[in-house]
Amino acid sequence: TGTTLLSETQVNFASLTGATGVVTHDFSTGDTFVHSSIAANFTVNLTNLPSATGRATVITLILQQGATPYYASAFQIGGVAQTIKWLGGSAGTPTASATDAQVFTIFQTGASTYIVLSQLGSYA
């Protein structure tokens, strides 16, 4: 309870290569994942997310795009599919040969109930 005041912070990130299909993103290694050599649109399977109703969690994917850009088009928590609600109503378009950031904000509203929001932006 109360307010936390920090002067400086750093977070760990995990590097993932060749994403395709279902890709495990282990929250115990950090909340930021840098993807390179992405092979297709993929599903994030977020594992080891602490279960706590009334909490929000932010997950960031850095997508280092090649000539054909891809993004995380589906989302799971512990292997259970979740509905993604997209900023503006649609996923947006990833950008070829750029660095995209895809952010997921997860609200746990019940024991196994989540609201998952996502947005995709490009840093060209």
Image (cartoon, rainbow, N blue to C red):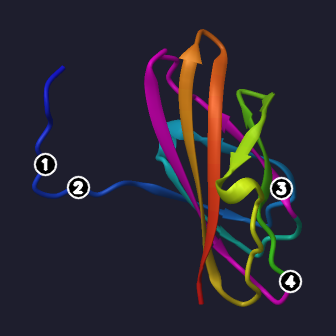
Q: Is residue 80 left or right of residue 1?
A: right
Where does label 1 land, which residue? Answer: 6
For marks 1 and 4 on the same chain, the one whose residue lies earlier in the sequence: 1
Which three-letter amino acid code belongs to the residue tagged 2? Thr
Query: Quarter of the image holding residue 119?
Result: bottom right
Which three-letter amino acid code belongs to the residue tagged 1? Leu
Query: Quarter of the image holding residue 117?
Result: top right
Distance of label 4 from label 3 (alpha carbons)? 14 Å
Which three-letter amino acid code belongs to the residue tagged 4? Thr
Residue 77 position, x and y percent, is 69, 30
Distance of label 3 from label 1 (alpha carbons)? 35 Å
Of residues 15 and 42, the one drawn nearer to the viewer in this rendering: 42
Residue that appears at 86% across and 62% down: 41
Characterize the local packing of mark 4: few (<14), some (14-19) or many (20 or more) Cα atoms within 10 angstroms.
Answer: few
Of the 4 image quadrants, the one containing the N terminus is: top left
Residue that appears at 80% across and 67% down: 18
- Secondary structure, mark 3, is strand
Bounds of the magenta span? 41-67
Where does label 3 land, which residue? Answer: 42
Instruction: Assess whether mark 1 and mark 3 are in contact (beta carbons under 8 angstroms).
Output: no
Instruction: Assess whether mark 3 and mark 4 are in contact (beta carbons under 8 angstroms).
Output: no
Of residues 55 and 28, the one drawn nearer to the viewer in this rendering: 55
* Residue 51 in magenta stretch: yes
